[in-house]
Amino acid sequence: MIDIYTEKKDSRDWIFQNDLYFNLHTCNEEMAQREINLIQQVDHAKLTPDKYIETVYGLGTIRNLSSGCKTLLNIIKNPDKVVCVEECGPNVLKIIFAMDNIKIYMSRPSLIDIPDDAKIRFNDSDIVTGSRGYNAWWSKEYERRESDDI
């Protein structure tokens, strides 16, 4: 189940500034093979044992990863937190929506490819399945926002 929250909450269990959070916390954690593979897949970067990344542009630190890649790693390393995905591109969102047991924040829909069997729960309430359910929920949400003059 993917939990999506569409209203901001001020909580220590929420990550809104993914770059900052990653640079202060997540980058200091040990990266498992799964995370190393995702870094390669998303940013086409090879992570070295001393936390540098090798790319076609040269050598950099792990802090030079893209915001989308940092967001993805924040989600994986912090499964108890709600992570904002609004800076993610379609390549990262496709990976995120193929995951399970995660919590994300998005205030608006993104055009993404969602697996047909993906279970999504909006705001601890409405449960939908796949792209059709996702798109239908957002259509109703925009109707609600319009009628509430939001």
Image: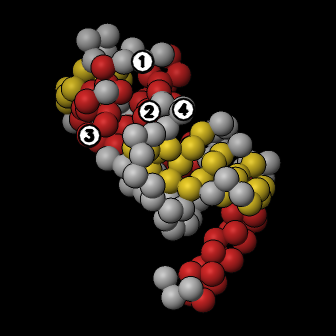
Q: Earlier in the sequence, mark 1 or mark 4?
A: 1
Mark 1: give few (<14), some (14-19) or many (20+) Cα within 10 Å. Answer: some
Asked whether disc 1 touches disc 2, contact meaning CB atoms under 8 Å apart, the reply is: yes
Choose mark 1 or mark 3, whichever is in front.
Answer: 3
Which residue is at 44% across, 50% downward? Answer: 84
The amino acid marked with disc number 3 is Leu
Residue 96 is tagged as: none
- Quadrant that contains the N terminus: top right
Q: CA distance from mark 1 to mark 3?
A: 18 Å
Mark 2: give few (<14), some (14-19) or many (20+) Cα within 10 Å. Answer: many
Mark 1, residue position? 31
Residue 73 is tagged as: 2
Give the side of residue 81 with respect to residue 120, left or right.
Answer: left
User: Element type at marker 2?
Assistant: helix
Mark 4, residue position? 79
Question: Is any part of residue 67 visible from this angle?
Answer: no
User: Element type at marker 4?
Assistant: loop
Q: CA distance from mark 3 to mark 4?
A: 18 Å
Choose mark 2 or mark 3, whichever is in front.
Answer: 3
Asked whether disc 2 touches disc 3, contact meaning CB atoms under 8 Å apart, the reply is: no
Asked whether disc 1 touches disc 3, contact meaning CB atoms under 8 Å apart, the reply is: no
Mark 3, residue position? 20
Residue 53 locus on image (x, y percent): 28, 25
Which residue is at 64% across, 71% downward? Answer: 138
The amino acid marked with disc number 4 is Pro
Which quadrant of the structure image shows residue 28?
A: top left
Q: CA distance from mark 1 to mark 2?
A: 9 Å
Q: Earlier in the sequence, mark 1 or mark 2?
A: 1
User: Element type at marker 3?
Assistant: helix
Choose mark 4 or mark 2, whichever is in front.
Answer: 4
